Structure formats: structure tokens, C-alpha cells
Image (cartoon, coloured by chain):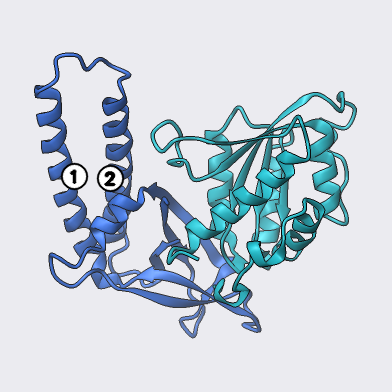
Chain colours: A cyan, B blue
Amino acid sequence: MSDKRGKDGEHRALLLFSAAALRDDKLEVMRHSKTNSPDMGEDIFLSATNAWVQRFGADTNSDYKEHPVFKDRDPASNRNVRVDVKNRKVVDKPHVQKFKADIKKHGDCDTHIMFGGRLSAAAKAELEEVKQDYPSKEILHVSQDQIPKLAANWGVSQTTLFPKPDEDSK
Amino acid sequence: MPVDFYLVKYELDPDGAYIDTSSDLICSITVSDEIYDAIMATEHGDPPQISSLEVFEETDKNKSFEVDCFQPNDVSKIRDRLREIFRDKVSAAAREFENSSTDLPGSESLERYFSQFRAITGLDELLSLKVMSYGTDAGVVVRVA
């Protein structure tokens, strides 16, 4: 691991989504450059099919319901996905407020995924408000405990992804 | 790797505790690791200090977590350092553009400087808000992630 927690987390997520892309011909993983994006290239972007996003939602959220806007769309239709990796044990309310502000900056994305961490109670309530504020966007949170399952689904070894899990504190 | 700065306001409880449910993000800015490393460099003296702040999830204070914050006394120091960085970047940009007759709007170097200046001025605004509008408010903290 490097000495930068943020960098490690982003690259682990990149590794994971890249593994998913190897298993799905229509899934592409993209990273914007520092200068051409409002977040200085911090987020990960996916070009995915509607079917892939819905499968992803069901795999990562036990109470997942297909989003009404995308439910009846062609499964092969394209979805533009932003992935905001949270390298934290707890994702709090200000994190969700920033995540919301960044939705406005990425008008071309119809799906926004907060990836990692555990939502605090206030963050959970705030995320529900974000979903109501953006009814045309699909907004998901993938909690940290769901990530090993994704890794297993996509053939990524746990030791590659989480060499020293205890060091991912805060 | 970019670094996020958050200016967050907490309504402190009667014991002075920080509670997540009462938090509100005033503004945030993402800066490049190059700018962050320049702020934290030791060559101009002691770097700004980051400390862990305990935040309780709810008012019952049963669960808590920690966030990284700059010491309130260091916020002005960070702003001073940032302004030095800005001055150096402006000088470098001026030299680069003076020596280039082919730079056109949309060129890579112009985009690079715009991106850097956006981050620097955005962070300056965040720090200035803390210094000028919330200087004595212990509930308003500059977080880094």
C-alpha cells in the first residue's frame, strides 16, 4: 500500500470495476483528467448498460427496487454512471452533502454511486433527501460490507483488494 | 490524488460535543495533491497541524467517529501559504505565456492553469470564510479528506 489512503481506495475501486469490465463487453471504466473535470479527476465513471446497473443495484442492496425512470427501458440501453469512492469507515452528513453538490456538476450522469463506508444515521437521512431532490437520477450507496461480495462476483481476490483492512480507519 | 477540503458547521451540544445530525456543509473544494503537498511542506517552517475530531452520530452520543481537521489557529497560516503558492503560479504562468507565441485559448497549459487557479481561489474562499465569518466559532471546522 502507498502512504495515501485516498489513492489506495480509489485504485482498489478502479481495480474492482476494471475486473467487472473484463466480464462485461458493454461496461467501460473511465477516469477524467485533472483539468477537464470539476472534481480534478477524483471520481470514476462507467459507461454501462441499464441491465448492468440494475444487476449491480440488486447485488449491493438487499432492498433494491428498480428505479421507475429506468425500469422499463431497454436492458441494453446506455447508462452514464459516476462512482464517488469513500475511503472512510463512516460516511457522514457533510460527505453526502458534497456528493449531492457534485451531482449538479455532472449533468451527463444519470446514475450516481457512493461507494464504500457505512452511512451514519444523519447521512442515511440526507441520502434519502438527495434521492427525492433528484427523481430522474438513480442514486445508490454501496456499503463497505458489500464490497467483498462484489469482489467475489467479479473474480478479484480479497488479499489484493484489502491487504490490511485494519489500516482503513476513520 | 486530489484532496478534499470541507468547511463544516456543527451546532455544538450543551457539553460542546460535535454531533453529525446537526452538521451542515458550508462549502467544499477539491485540490490537487501538488497543491496540498505544497501547503503541508516543511521547508517554510512548521506545517499546519491536522488533528482528529470526535463526532457523535446522534445526540444520545452512543456512537462516534473521527474526522481530520486543521487546528483553528493554523487556518490563517494555510491561507498565507496558499497565497504564496498562488503568487508563484501566477509568475510561472506569466513567464510561460510570455515565452509562447502559439498558446491559444483551449490549449493544454491554459487549461492546466485555469484548473489550478480554480482550486487555489476556491480553497482561499473556503479558508477566508472560516477566518472572516466564523473565526471565533468553534463549531465551524476545516476538514480534510
Structural crowding at the residue carrying mark 2, measured as other residues with C-alpha within 10 Å and reported as few (<14), some (14–19) or many (≥20): many
Residue A96: where, in percent of width, then height? 59, 54
The residue tagged with tag 2: helix, strand or loop?
helix
Q: Nearer the viewer, residue A19 or B58?
A: A19
Residue at 14% in and 70% down:
B45
Q: Is residue B36 visible?
A: yes
Structural crowding at the residue carrying mark 1, measured as other residues with C-alpha within 10 Å and reported as few (<14), some (14–19) or many (≥20): some
Q: Nearer the viewer, residue B5 or A128?
A: B5
In which chain is the residue bearing label 1? B
Residue A22: where, in percent of width, then height? 73, 40
Residue B129, above or below B112: below
Q: Which amino acid is tagged 1? A: Phe
Residue A57: where, in percent of width, then height? 81, 47
Q: Which amino acid is tagged 2? A: Ile
Residue at 38% in and 34% down:
A35
| Residue wearing tag 2 | B120
The residue tagged with tag 1: helix, strand or loop?
helix
- Marks 2/1 in contact by CB < 8 Å: the verdict is yes
Badge number at residue B86: 1
Q: Is residue A117 visible?
A: no
Residue B116: where, in percent of width, then height? 29, 39
Q: Earlier in the sequence, mark 2 or mark 1?
A: 1
Quick check: A86 left or right of B120? right
- Image quadrant of residue B9? bottom left
Residue at 14% in and 28% down:
B96
- Image quadrant of residue A91? bottom right
Badge number at residue B98: none
- Say yes or no: labels 2 and 1 on the same chain: yes
- Image quadrant of residue A29? top right
How many tags in the picture?
Answer: 2
Q: Nearer the viewer, residue B143 or A86?
A: A86
Residue at 60% in and 48% down:
A14
